[in-house]
Structures are given as C-alpha cells and as structure tokens.
Image (tube, grey):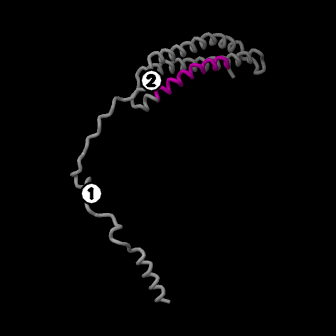
C-alpha cells in the first residue's frame, strides 16, 4: 500500500514539472534598466468648459425673477388669509382658504427651485470638467438667495396662521 501511495505521489509530482521554456524569463526588461526611451506626455489641451452661454444665464436669471415676481404677487394675499385664519378652528373656511393660498404660494416657489436646480446642474457640469464657471456660480447664488427669502416668507405666513 505504501508503494502504491509513493508511486502516485511521484506521478503527481512529475506532472507539475514542465519544460524550461514555459517559465518567464528573469532577465531585466527594458523599462527596468532605465535605458528605455521616455517620451514626454503631450501637454493637455485647454479645459473643456460646458456650453453655458451668457444668453442662457440671462434666460435663467429672467425665469427666476419672473417666478419671484409671481411669488411676491401671491405672498400678500396668502399673508392676509393666514392672518384672517389665525385662531380659527381647523374646520373653518378661513383656515381652508389660507391653506390653499399657502399651497399656491409653495407651488409658485417651486418654479424658483426648478431654476436653481438647473443652475446646480450647470455648476456640477462645470465642476466635473474641472473648470468652474464664475458666472454660473454667481447666478446660482442670486437664485439661492431668492429661494431662501421665499422659504422665510412661507415660514412666516405659516407662523402667523398658527397651528
């Protein structure tokens, strides 16, 4: 039995041995010796800037201004209705009218938020191209300020109405 096991072991070992030509060479490769010719990398081209034209930014600024004007036109009415609903029961018509006016005000705010989202996308494209566009960033800040003012107005009106 020992002899059979020893023969099988020898047969298995001989299967692992192959010819000398199958092993990789241990000789130095050209890049290891330092004598390989090194070609300098080509200078990179100018950064690619996303196609955000001044006209497109003006269009987005105008859209934000228009949405802000619509918001301002509805804000006074919503504030008036909220003051009228203050202290009224939840089931009252005055409270229902104030909530509808606030919902309308919030949907008008969404137009400003949509413009900001578009500007955020343009800024992300510019950042992805490693070429931030100062004009996009400035417009983004302007629209974000409008949106913050609208958020504060909605919170103020909700506070005036009370819970």
In contact (CB < 8 Å): disc 2 and disc 1: no
Apparent side of residue 161 relative to residue 146 in the rendered image (left or right): right
Q: Earlier in the sequence, mark 2 or mark 1?
A: 1
Q: Is 10 placed above or below 131 here?
A: below
Q: Is residue 105 left or right of residue 116?
A: right
Res 79 quadrant in image: top right
Query: Residue 161 appears at what percent x and percent y?
Result: 68, 18
* Residue 75 visible to the viewer: yes
Residue 4 in the image: x percent, y percent?
48, 87
Q: Identify the residue at horizontal 51%, vertical 15% (top origin).
A: 59
Q: Is residue 114 in the magenta section?
A: yes
Q: Secondary structure at mark 2?
A: loop
Residue found at the far left of this picture: 35
Q: Which residue is mark 2?
A: 51
Location of residue 120 in the rendering, given as x and y in whole percent from the top left corner: 50, 26
Query: In which quadrant of the rendered image does the C terminus lie?
Result: top right
Q: Residues within 10 Å of mark 1 (few under 14, many from 20)?
A: few
Q: Tell me the number on the disc at residue 163.
A: none
Q: CA distance from mark 2 to mark 1?
A: 47 Å
Q: Position of residue 162 (x, y in %)?
A: 68, 20
Q: Nearer the viewer, residue 107 or 82?
A: 107
Residue that appears at 48% across and 18% down: 56
Q: Is residue 127 left or right of residue 67?
A: left
- Bounds of the magenta segment: 102-124
Q: Residues within 10 Å of mark 2 (few under 14, many from 20)?
A: few
Q: State which quadrant residue 23 falls in.
A: bottom left
Q: Is residue 113 above or below residue 40?
A: above
Per the image, label 1 sits on a secondary structure element best described as loop
Asked if one can make out residue 159 in the rendered structure from this viewpoint, the answer is no
Q: Toward the viewer: 152 or 159?
A: 152
Q: As displayed, is residue 52 above or below residue 30?
A: above
Which residue in the protein does label 1 denote? 29
């Amino acid at each position: 039995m020992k002899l059979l096991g020893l023969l099988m072991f020898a047969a298995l070992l001989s299967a692992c041995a192959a010819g000398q030509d199958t092993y990789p060479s241990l000789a130095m490769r050209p890049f290891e010796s330092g004598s390989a010719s090194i070609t300098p990398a080509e200078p990179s081209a100018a950064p690619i800037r996303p196609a955000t034209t001044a006209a497109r930014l003006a269009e987005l600024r105008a859209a934000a201004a228009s949405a802000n004007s619509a918001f301002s036109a509805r804000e006074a009415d919503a504030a008036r209705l909220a003051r009228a609903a203050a202290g009224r029961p939840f089931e009252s018509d005055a409270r229902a009218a104030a909530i509808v006016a606030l919902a309308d005000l919030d949907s008008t705010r969404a137009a400003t938020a949509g413009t900001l989202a578009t500007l955020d996308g343009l800024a992300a494209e510019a950042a992805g191209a490693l070429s931030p566009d100062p004009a996009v960033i400035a417009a983004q800040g302007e629209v974000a300020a409008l949106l913050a003012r609208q958020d504060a107005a909605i919170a103020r009106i909700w506070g005036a109405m009370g819970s």
